[in-house]
Image (spheres, grey):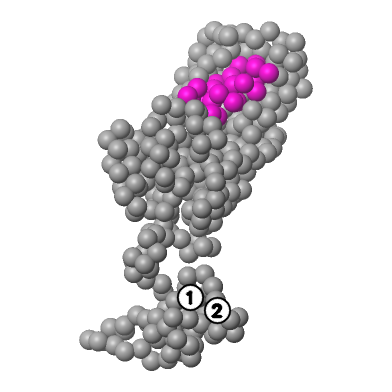
Amino acid sequence: MTMHSTGGRRKPPTIHDVAREAGVSRGTVSRVLNGGHYVSPSAQEAVNAAIRRTGYVVNRHARSLITGRSDSVGFLLTEPQERFFEDPNFNVLLRGCTQALATHDIPLLLMLAGTEDERRRITRYITAGHVDGVLLVSSHSGDPVAEQLREAGVPLVACGKPIGLGSKVSYVAADDRDGARDMVRHLLSLGRRRIGVVTGPLDTPGGVERLAGYREVLTEGGIEIDERLIVSGDYSRSSGEAGAERLLAQVPDMDAVFVASDLMAQGVLAVVQRSGRRVPEDVAVGGFDDSPAATATSPELTTIRQPWDRISAEMVRVLLAQIGGEDPAAVILPTELVKRRST
């Protein structure tokens, strides 16, 4: 089909071009674009074929004026910007959510809000209707964003259970406690008994649940918990280094460490090896996530695999269902122990 051109530039095809190509009315094309209700299968097939032939692209702005929707979704990370570039988990999750939304032809807007001012500005932007819903990542307790968006009626799905909001907010999470239990059982099965832990932030669900799993398995095994073997980090490599230095200073004969993220485990490995101890012969090290950081170490890291592809897909599925009017939902996904050479 020949498109009109002005000044040598090809004009983009319109809904009228699609209707003419398909041999149907403009209204039929519009109904196909808005879900295919009250359209015969033959007419729908003709319209879809015409869209492919003409190269027609939906004018989202025009459609949003009619539907009241933006046809876009926000990916909101309430962490300092440097954490987005340092922690590989965020990039893996962002990529998975982008791909899951692409199958629905919905663009994803990345929003970084690491400061109180940034969170306030982005909350105003979201509640003004510029996105149809939000995928919220890394919300600490005391962070008001999740509650503000919920109160404003914005469809919302969190990665991990937001502390204090319970069933009020949809979330998708790996089974943090069960994953931690699997790792500590594995370390015990190797004959290790003085097992340290570097936790995540204890105002996040992952931090709380992974520490709980550690405590439970040691208690079940009849091993008295030594509080000197418990230090906390913030999921950064530097906090893993600081945690390992504290653990080795407090309990020099520590023979294993469960680290609540692979990135922190990188820091732990570096400090343990600098101290002259061998991994895993003297100190076994286990991480959590099975992120790219796990295979960037020497030795490669035994870790707990979070099913990032499934987490991304479920976050998108639950959010789109909520945008469509469904109630909040919670999804807990199983983890898996991945054995490598650090244990």
- Label at residue 31: 1
Q: Is residue 232 above or below residue 18?
A: above
Q: Is residue 320 above or below residue 174?
A: below
The residue sitting at 59% across, 26% down in the picture is: 209
The residue sitting at 33% across, 65% down in the picture is: 65
User: Is 198 covered by the magenta stretch?
Assistant: yes
The residue sitting at 43% across, 40% down in the picture is: 150
Can you identify the residue that label 2 sits on? Answer: 39
Highlighted magenta segment, given as a residue range: 195-216
Q: Amino acid at mark 1?
A: Arg
Crowdedness near tag 2: few (<14), some (14–19) or many (≥20) residues, C-alpha within 10 Å: some
Q: Which one is earlier in the sequence, the residue at label 2 or at label 1?
A: 1
Q: Quadrant of the C terminus?
A: top right
Q: Residue furthest left?
A: 7
Q: Is residue 41 above or below residue 207?
A: below
Q: Quadrant of the N terminus?
A: bottom left
Of residue 302 and residue 136, the one placed in the foreground of this image is: 136
Q: Position of residue 230 (x, y in %)?
A: 56, 14
User: Is 12 covered by the magenta stretch?
Assistant: no
Of residue 179 and residue 235, the one placed in the foreground of this image is: 179
Classify residue 277 as left or right of residue 153: right
Q: Position of residue 296 (x, y in %)?
A: 55, 38
Of residue 137 and residue 274, the one placed in the foreground of this image is: 137
Classify residue 148 as left or right of residue 120: right
